[in-house]
Amino acid sequence: MRSETALIHRFRDSRQQHGAVNPPIVHASTIRFPTLEDLDREHEVRSSYGLHGTATHFGLIDNLSAMEEAFDSHLVPSGLAAITLPLMAFLRTGDHLLVPDNCYGPTRRFADTVLQKLDIATTYYPPAAASETIAELTNPQTAVILLESPGSDTFEMQDVAAIATMAKARGIKTIMDNTWAAGYYFKPLQHGIDVSIQALTKYVAGHSDCLLGLIAAKTEADWKQIDKVHRAFGTGHCSAEIAYLAARGLRSMPARLALHQDNALKMAHWLESQPEVLKVHFPALESHAGHALWKRDYTGTTSLFAFELPNRNRKKLAEFLDNLRFYGMGYSWGGYESLLVPKSPQTTRPYSGWDNDHQLLRIHVGLEHIDDLIEDMDAGIKRYLA
Ligand SMILES: Cc1ncc(COP(=O)(O)O)c(C=O)c1O
């Protein structure tokens, strides 16, 4: 069965749902046990309390675990929680953590506040660093290497397999933020990564109306270690309604991604052909420094990337962005509508060497007609340059 078909047909059974196509939304705090013997064996059931999930969560978890080729997974109430929770599971006081300099911003905030308070030291490594460079930054206390490829806002690629092999040889756990690939165009657990996380908020939910995250573990031992922290923190998964919406989104995700991909490639090529556009940061383009890695490892591209215009100019930027017809200005991404936001990596990243005076813009290419998107972008860039 191919992946598109598998995501549609797995983990639902109309016969058990009175013929309905979609599984029901199951709400629960109390889970009842019919006999004392059943109660005595509560640890043998998948959930003995609503906090630990209902059938709605498990249908989504099982479909995602199969997609990620994981032993098992946990849901959490946001993509950010999918990053912080496994870090709490694998780190203890005195440990050292390695994080890419182009990580999702709040990941850095978590490391610099909560982890620092626990005396867990973080070193930020250059975004496209080779595994040998990262190896030089390890020390006997290094317990986790976090990866994010392509990284946030500037989209540098990492050699995931090489970093995972280096980490394994040193007994270091690897956790990868794989949100960009939607867990679909790249499967970190196939490339030696221990834990693959993603913000399901983005392409899986796909409609800009849900927040939730996935933590997918390759081995039972890692899943259990994460499970202990998941239970201890009491965040549970997400609400049953949110799990339902994400499960529904997942079934149509490959079809949406195909159009996102098509539109993104057309937009990126058009931007690249514009003389005023200084650079397009998109691994699916041949001009990108990480294109060979993308081509080697990824089976497709999603639709988030960035480009540079000359001369940062706030007034011109407002004329460009405030008058767009089809692009929303706002955070998050992965929904059906296009988004465009200015970014300033120079303000937060010591390693990335982002010291030019260009204006960086991050684009999420949605599912609108590409000609409308290009026309709107063309008019906007002309306003910026006028
Ligand atoms: C790469 C990446 N990882 C994680 C997250 C966090 O997801 P959430 O907004 O669900 O917390 C985001 C959100 O923008 C992201 O861009």
Image (cartoon, rainbow, N blue to C red):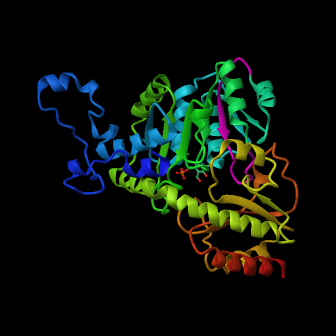
Instruction: Report the front residue among 196 and 48.
Output: 196
Helix, strand or loop: magenta stretch: loop
The C terminus, quarter of image: bottom right
Quarter where residue 252 is shown: bottom left
Q: Residue furthest left?
A: 35
Q: Position of residue 32 (x, y in %)?
A: 17, 36
Asked if one can make out residue 366 in the rendered structure from this viewpoint, the answer is yes
Image side of residue 12 versus residue 97, left or right: left
Q: What residue do we see at 66% from left, 67% from top?
A: 340
Quarter where residue 363 is shown: bottom right
Q: What residue do we see at 22% from left, 23% from top?
A: 41
How many numbered marks are there? 0
Instruction: Report the front residue among 57 and 122.
Output: 57
Q: What residue do we see at 24% from left, 57% from top?
A: 20
The N terminus, quarter of image: top left
Instruction: Report the front residue among 4 and 124.
Output: 4
Asked if one can make out residue 97 in the rendered structure from this viewpoint, the answer is no
Q: Is residue 45 above or below residue 273?
A: above
Q: Position of residue 66 (x, y in %)?
A: 45, 39
Q: Residue furthest front?
A: 1
Residue 143 in the magenta stretch? The answer is yes
Q: Position of residue 284 (x, y in %)?
A: 72, 54
Q: What residue do we see at 46% from left, 49% from top?
A: 212
- The stretch of residues the image draws in magenta is 139-157
Q: Position of residue 362 (x, y in %)?
A: 70, 61
Residue 293 in the magenta stretch? The answer is no
Instruction: Report the front residue among 100 and 46.
Output: 46
Quarter where residue 113 is shown: top right
